[in-house]
């Protein structure tokens, strides 16, 4: 094995890795629904391309979410959270755009309001291969009087460069 490859793999034997590994393993076991999608080893971007070929148009983000978060052959979501997020996003899109045929592919404000704030630089439902996975939004905590969760306005949009 080449020395530079070996050096990159040494991270798994390091003290920090050995310290974090049991914590991460426990978190995955306690919240299994947080780590589930039905994509297998297929990138979300690949699903997007396939849906675009199928529909002969760019798919809505919601269609991509359905493809990757519903059990194959059924109309059941993989988790209660996936169902709640999809329904909340759908309501938000209907509130903001109605039956407008010019709906954007993705309304990030509505998605984050439906799925929750980004956690560790990741937004629920975004595959790591989608460019939007690196968008971090910070919402004002002072907007507690809003009548709808979809009326929150972003204060900061920060694009984080991909990891090397």
Image (cartoon, grey):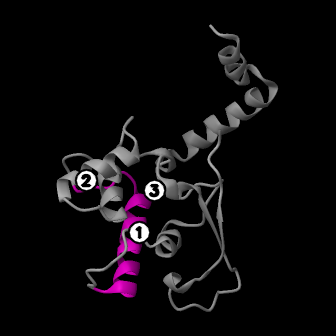
Pointer 3 local density, CA inside 10 Å: few below 14, some 14–19, many at least 20: many
Q: Which residue is mark 3?
A: 125
Residue at left 63%, top 55%?
A: 121
Residue at x 70% of width, y 80% of height: 141
Q: Nearer the viewer, residue 12 or 25?
A: 12
- Quarter of the image with the C terminus in it: top right
- Mark 3 and mark 2: Cα distance apart in space: 17 Å
| Quadrant assignment for the N terminus | top right
Q: Position of residue 94 (x, y in %)?
A: 34, 82
Mark 1 and mark 2 lie on one chain; the one further toward the N terminus is 2
- Please indicate whether residue 98 sits to the left or right of residue 55 in the image: right
Which residue was labeled with disc 2? 51
Which residues are the magenta region? 75-98
Tell me the distance, in whole angstroms, between the alpha carbons under discs 3 and 1.
12 Å
- Sequence-wise, the earlier of marks 3 and 1 is 1
* Main secondary structure of the magenta stretch: helix
Task: Return the mark for residue 106.
Answer: 1
């Amino acid at each position: 094995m080449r020395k530079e490859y070996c050096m990159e793999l040494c991270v798994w034997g390091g003290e920090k890795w050995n310290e974090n590994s049991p914590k991460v393993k426990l978190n995955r076991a306690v919240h299994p629904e947080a780590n589930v999608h039905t994509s297998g080893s297929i990138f979300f971007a690949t699903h997007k391309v396939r849906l675009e070929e199928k529909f002969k148009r760019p798919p809505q983000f919601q269609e991509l979410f359905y493809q990757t978060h519903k059990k194959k052959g059924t109309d059941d979501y993989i988790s209660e959270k996936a169902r709640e997020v999809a329904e909340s996003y759908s309501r938000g899109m209907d509130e903001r755009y109605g039956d407008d045929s010019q709906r954007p592919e993705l309304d990030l404000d509505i998605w984050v309001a439906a799925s929750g704030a980004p956690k560790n630089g990741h937004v629920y439902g975004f595959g790591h291969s989608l460019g939007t996975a690196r968008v971090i939004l910070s919402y004002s905590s002072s907007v507690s009087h809003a009548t709808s969760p979809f009326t929150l306005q972003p204060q900061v949009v920060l694009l984080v460069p991909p990891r090397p």
